[in-house]
Image: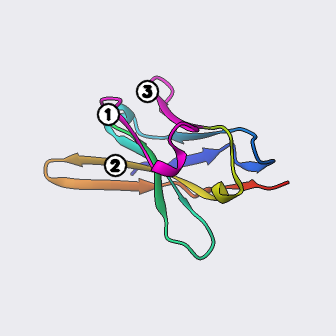
Amino acid sequence: QVQLVESGGGLVQPGGSLRLSCAASASIFSRYAMGWYRQAPGKQRELVAGVTSGNSTNYADSVKGRFTISRDNAKNTVYLQMNSLKPEDTAVYYCKAERINMGLRYVYWGQGTQVTVSS
């Protein structure tokens, strides 16, 4: 079982920045692919950014050039740096850890952190 704890959400004005953190309890954190997802009211949860165990990254088109995902395996933590925030970035942001081992897929989610972009 892996526990994920997100932090760093809050209220920010349009154009501002926030950095989200997700701390994982897994001792083999480096073997997990990590991702940030978000869910706005009335909408489905969507992928924002992901980073593989090999440190390859991918982003939703809507955040490319504004958000950066990174991981620190020594700290068992993944980050999401969000710049040039827009009101449409308002959502609950969730951290996800995923690993495939011996043909089995393991997926864990954090509890979410609220990001509100508003003037």
Kindly identify the amino acid type of the residue bearing the numbered disc 3.
Asn
Which residue is at 49% across, 70% downward? 44
Tell me which label, 1 or 3, sits earlier in the chain.
1
CB contact under 8 Å: marks 2 and 1: no
Regarding residue 88, the answer to whether it shows in the image is yes
On the picture, is 85 further left or further right than 74?
Answer: right
Which residue is at 75% across, 42% downward? 15
Determine whether 88 is above or below 9 in the image. Answer: below
Count residues near mark 2 (Cα–Cα under 10 Å), then give few for <14, some for 14-19, many for 20+: some
**Residue situated in front as seen by the camera: 42 or 52:** 42
Kindly identify the amino acid type of the residue bearing the numbered disc 1.
Ser
Which residue is at 75% across, 40% downward? 16
Q: Quadrant of the C terminus?
A: bottom right
User: How far from the left and from the top, in percent, is residue 101?
Assistant: 19, 46
User: How far from the left and from the top, in percent, is residue 62?
Assistant: 52, 51
Q: Nearer the viewer, mark 1 or mark 3?
A: 1
Q: Quadrant of residue 89?
A: bottom right
Kindly identify the amino acid type of the residue bearing the numbered disc 2.
Glu
> Can you tell which mark lies on residue 53?
1
CA distance for labels 2 and 1:
10 Å
Per the image, the residue denoted by label 3 is: 73
Q: Is residue 72 magenta?
A: yes
